[in-house]
Amino acid sequence: MDETLSFRAEVGSTRLYEIGATAPGAGLEQFIATSPGTRAICNDPRIYGLDYTRRLRKTCAEALGVFEGAFTEREAVVVNILRGGLNFGLREALGDAFGWNSHTTCFMSAQRARDDGNPENWHITENSYKKVYFPPRASLVIGDVVATGTSLRYGLHEFIAAAHQQGVDLRNILFFTYGGPKAGEILAEVDAHCRKIFPHYGRTILIYLEGRFTCPTTETPLTIRLTGTDLVRWGSLMAPEFIESQYENPLFPVERCIIYDAGSRAFWTREYLEDVLGYWKQNLDLARRGVTFEALVRERCPFLDPARFGDVDLAAISRSQLDWLAKQL
């Protein structure tokens, strides 16, 4: 059965939809938040650096407003799984949303890498740095990009184990993501685990930004894809506003990924721009081999009507994007 989206609330320019329906405290609660800022991030790779993180922080702050009263300033702990967690600006977003100043922030490094024997498997590296501390009663506020979930599963395990070892009264987890289904799978496992070991555990809230996107595998029918890394529109559950926004520019629906590499997009922009440029070189090559814009839209976004874009030349838009990207490098 297809999952349903139900409108839940609107704060500022951000609208929140609930996926299915779960009573607060009864299990994992899942939502999709949509805003002009996070739609622009997904659609337009020309948004990067501070422009990218400021838009992301604004949407997170507005979405947090829906859950005002779920936890207090003294118990709020912002968890940063480095470096992706820094993109969301949640320490500042809590201040923007509620006027808070003294909430806690923790840090942990957890970089994933492909296994040499099987590149479709991943393991954790660069995990030596930790600054983990909790107030006696804590609610975790976390943001991360989730494709395979390798870093998320490791990071949450470490933080929850530390809280349990320290005798913390863990109450809630609120998680923001540009992510795929693995985020929901892992947070559901975490919710069940926390209810067993923390007597007063209350809510696990998962907020997808713009959609619950697909992370392609070797079986996903896309000509260009990075398995275990990309988050794509194909086969995804998306906010209606995000779907409609695809028609604003023919570049949008044929982008390879809705986020590309989140860390470099914020902190090492040359690497990020080279990644996007490489993809559009591939699109130009497809056009030279006879692939049309309509065919590419039907492949990557079969839920869209290519006729609404009019007559679009894939080679022409590829060259335009490449020219812009080359000027940034």
Image (spheres, rainbow, N blue to C red):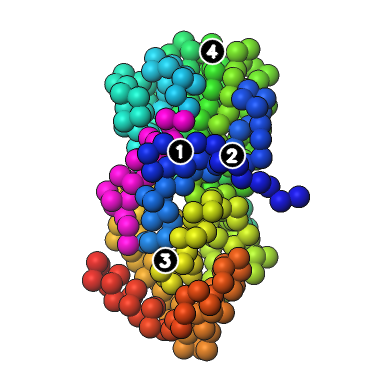
Disc 1 from disc 3: Cα separation: 23 Å
Point 54% across, 17% down: residue? 170
Relative image position of residue 245 (x, y in whole percent): 45, 60
Q: Is residue 232 above or below residue 155?
A: below
Relative image position of residue 127 (x, y in whole percent): 46, 37
Disc 1 from disc 2: Cα separation: 12 Å
- Residue type of the residue flagged with mark 4: Asp
Q: Earlier in the sequence, mark 1 or mark 3?
A: 1
Part of the protein shown in magenta:
46-66
Q: Are marks 4 and 3 in contact (CB under 8 Å)?
A: no
- Residue type of the residue flagged with mark 1: Glu
Q: Are marks 2 and 4 in contact (CB under 8 Å)?
A: no
Question: For residue 13, what is the image quadrant?
Answer: top left
- Label 4 or label 3, whichever lies nearer to me, is 3
Point 61% across, 68% down: residue? 302
Q: Earlier in the sequence, mark 2 or mark 4?
A: 2
Q: Earlier in the sequence, mark 3 or mark 2?
A: 2
- Residue type of the residue flagged with mark 2: Glu
Q: Is residue 301 above or below residue 236?
A: below
Q: Earlier in the sequence, mark 1 or mark 2?
A: 1
Disc 1 from disc 4: Cα separation: 31 Å
Q: Which residue is mark 4?
A: 169
Disc 2 from disc 4: Cα separation: 27 Å
Q: Which residue is mark 3?
A: 248
Q: Which mark is residue 18?
A: 2
Q: Element under label 2?
A: strand
Q: Residues within 10 Å of mark 1 (few under 14, many from 20)?
A: some
Q: Which residue is mark 1?
A: 10
Q: Element under label 3?
A: helix
| Front residue (pair 236, 116) | 236
Q: Residue furthest right?
A: 1
Relative placement, left or right, of 121 versus 66 is right
